[in-house]
Amino acid sequence: MKSFDIPIIYRSPLITAIKKKRKEMDKMKKDFSPTLLDFGPLHIYLARHFGFCYGVENAIEIAFKTVDKNPGKRIFLLSEMIHNPQVNADLQSHGIQFLQDTYGKQLIPFEEITKDDIVITPAFGTTLAIEEKLANIGIAVEKYNTTCPFVEKVWTRSEQIAKKDYTIIIHGKPKHEETRATFSHAAANAPSVVVKDMGEAKQLAKYIAGEKDASAFYDEFKGQHSEGFNVQNDLQRIGVVNQTTMLASDTQGIADFLKQVMIEKYNLNAANIAERFADTRDTLCYATNDNQSAVTGMLEVKADLAIVVGGYNSSNTSHLVELCEEKLPTYFINNEEKILSAKEILHYNFHTKEEILSTNYLPAKDPVKILITSGASCPDALVEGVINKLVSFFTGSLSSNQLISAFN
Ligand code: SF4
């Protein structure tokens, strides 16, 4: 896969060495076991895959190059580049301004943009309406477009099934930038509905089966269906695509469930299911699949706790947390400063959306075993910072620098 030129401050010498070594030993990416970092009294198990993905590195490279090559120009990003506070703050410190917040709230009116400005589209992509608005101002939208090719792949898949007259069901978070963009592209080609989870898929199934009055649909799926959606006509042939960062098991579960609903409603079988249900398979991206599989591999280790590093509004990171939480105490932090001491840690509860303080998170034993991973928008340097902070609490530990030679 292509390598990118991103600021060195995001890299970690230790993690770069580990990733390089693991890649050399497992070119086909078949081994999802974690890497043991044996510091002595502290054992850290690092997931096989984590950190910056293709789309994030591509977007960061383009954004920083744009700044370098355009001194004196006003540069805007449609919204957060990626869901990582450090990267976004770095971009802002280089003079980049955000036009909207993560949820689409306008921070700077489009009226203030002129044709001489640069507007960068983030990795999540954007809606057709925003593209049109910018094009009308005279902005060269395509020139600074960092939309990830794996997101565009979902749009292409939607277009393909739309051409065959299927309605598009999008499994994604309705307010997430990527899902809003995908919904906009899908709705331009076919009737479309967003379902955020199995609960909503089950409600949608009631309309498919005719168990619920169609008039209730418009309130229930308000803001999540395309204009002019006709419940009677538009749920007779469907295909499911998804936000690229959803939990693989949820995505599969929802697609299987809706397929079964169609089978029962229309009395179908394997030979004629395609008449009513498009075979889209999942549209998760490679990074989501790799990172989630690596967490599953890491969870085979009997450890004391897990730490997941990433932005609190990062969808892919929250799913890694979800997987870990099922097995052991898990702390979701966005940098090493959240580890206040050997006794206290501030961490994010993404279910209640609040940061909480936990005490005595490190057990009194030798060795303490900690699993660590991070989201696709998290710089490796942050993970190394977390490792070094933890190591500092254990007297007699080796240092990261001492360990690095084992991977060179
Ligand atoms: S998580 Fe996947 S879809 Fe999103 S930017 Fe990364 S590679 Fe692209």
Image: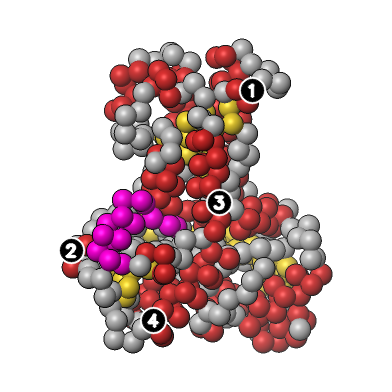
How far is mark 2 from mark 4, CA to CA?
Answer: 22 Å
Quarter of the figure with the C terminus: bottom right
Do labels 2 and 3 touch, CB within 8 Å? no
Q: Amino acid at mark 3?
A: Lys
Q: Is residue 13 left or right of residue 28?
A: left
Counting other residues with Cα less than 10 Å from the Cα at mark 3, is it few (<14), some (14-19), or many (20 or more)?
some
- Going from the N terminus, do you reach mark 4 or mark 1 first? 4
Query: Could you tell me which secondary element the residue under label 2 belongs to?
Result: helix
> Where residue 379 sits: x, y (%)?
53, 72
Counting other residues with Cα less than 10 Å from the Cα at mark 1, is it few (<14), some (14-19), or many (20 or more)?
some
Q: Amino acid at mark 2?
A: Glu
Residue placed at 61% from the left, 64% from the top?
Answer: 50
Q: Between 379 and 295, which is closer to the camera in this rendering?
A: 379
Residue 55 appears in the figure: yes
Query: Could you tell me which secondary element the residue under label 3 belongs to?
Result: helix
Quarter of the figure with the N terminus: bottom right
